[in-house]
């Protein structure tokens, strides 16, 4: 059953958000977003995370995916003022752009939610549980069928941290194999993740 929005996290109901989403992106992507929401909610139930918060970020994550590139970049830079973004593309831009849209158009001021939306593709600095849930839900939703997705699903059920590290590592390995320029922010986020894990292990 769909989540009823009662927390005032955004300025509209789930029904309204879904309607706006349906009008904004193509049908195949709309179906992907609904699968991501369903996957994210399943994870949230297991992890005792807030379902409404998870629903909002899942539905918002690809909201900017089909915007004109110049508008998408402008929004991305507004959320994440990193000049190196100009050297990237819409695969990188659409997350931060959607986060800024969520703030400007839907009135969301919850930084945890905005960061989760912004980092759903390449991760984010100091990812919390919400960010990890969306990061993995987008990667393992039932419509995904890439090599390694079953391992990603297994790891997600075992440990979100292990799953997130797997996704980060596999993404960078894939980009290297494709011989494409890797957006420096992707490496920065990976390095921050590893540094954080090393610090945590040292404290145990």
Image (cartoon, helix red, strand yellow):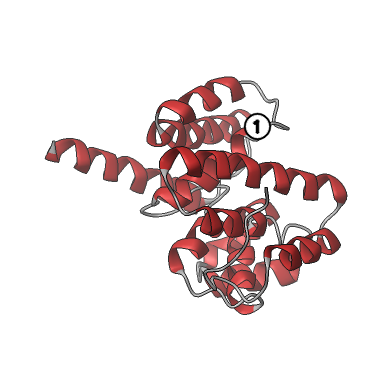
From the viewer's perspective, tell me whether residue 187 is left or right of residue 142: left
Residue located 54% across and 47% down the image: 134
Q: Residue furthest left?
A: 203
Front residue (pair 176, 42)? 42
* Residue drawn at (23%, 38%) of the image: 198
Label 1 sits on residue: 178
Please state the horizontal and vertical placement of residue 11, each as a whole percent of the image. 63, 76
Residue at horizontal 67 percent and vertical 73 percent from the top: 12
Provide residue 167's location: percent of width, then percent of height.
51, 34
User: Measuring 41% from the left and 26% from the top, which residue is drawn there?
Assistant: 158
Q: Secondary structure at mark 1?
A: loop
Q: In which quadrant will I find the C terminus? A: top left
In the drawing, does residue 91 fall left or right of residue 152?
right
Percent from the top left, x then y, of residue 125? 39, 54
Q: Is residue 99 above or below residue 148?
A: below
Pick whichever, 139 or 195, lies toward us.
Answer: 139
Relative placement, left or right, of 115 versus 36 is left
Front residue (pair 172, 180): 172
Q: Relative to 105, is 120 on the left or the right? A: left
| Label 1, residues with CA under 10 Å away: few <14, some 14-19, many ≥20 | few
Q: Give coordinates of residue 119: x percent, y percent.
A: 52, 54
Quadrant for residue 144, please give it.
top right
State which quadrant residue 85 falls in.
bottom right
Q: Does residue 68 show up?
A: no
Q: Note whether residue 76 is visible.
A: yes
């Amino acid at each position: 059953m769909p989540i009823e929005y009662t927390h005032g996290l955004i300025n509209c109901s789930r029904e309204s958000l879904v309607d706006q989403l349906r009008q904004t992106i193509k049908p195949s992507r709309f179906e992907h977003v609904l699968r991501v929401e369903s996957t994210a909610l399943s994870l949230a139930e297991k992890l005792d995370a807030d379902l409404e918060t998870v629903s909002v970020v899942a539905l918002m994550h690809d909201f900017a995916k089909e915007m004109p590139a110049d508008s998408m970049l402008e929004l991305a830079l507004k959320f994440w003022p990193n000049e190196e973004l100009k050297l990237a593309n819409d695969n990188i831009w659409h997350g931060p752009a959607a986060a800024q849209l969520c703030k400007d158009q839907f009135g969301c001021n919850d930084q945890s939610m905005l960061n989760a939306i912004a980092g759903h593709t390449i991760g984010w600095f100091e990812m919390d549980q919400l960010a990890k849930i969306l990061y993995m839900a987008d990667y393992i939703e039932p419509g995904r069928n890439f090599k390694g997705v079953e391992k990603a699903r297994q790891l997600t059920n075992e440990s979100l941290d292990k799953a997130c590290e797997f996704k980060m590592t596999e993404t960078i390995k894939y980009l290297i194999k494709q011989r494409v320029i890797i957006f420096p922010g992707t490496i920065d986020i990976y390095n921050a993740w590893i540094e954080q894990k090393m610090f945590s292990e040292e404290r145990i």
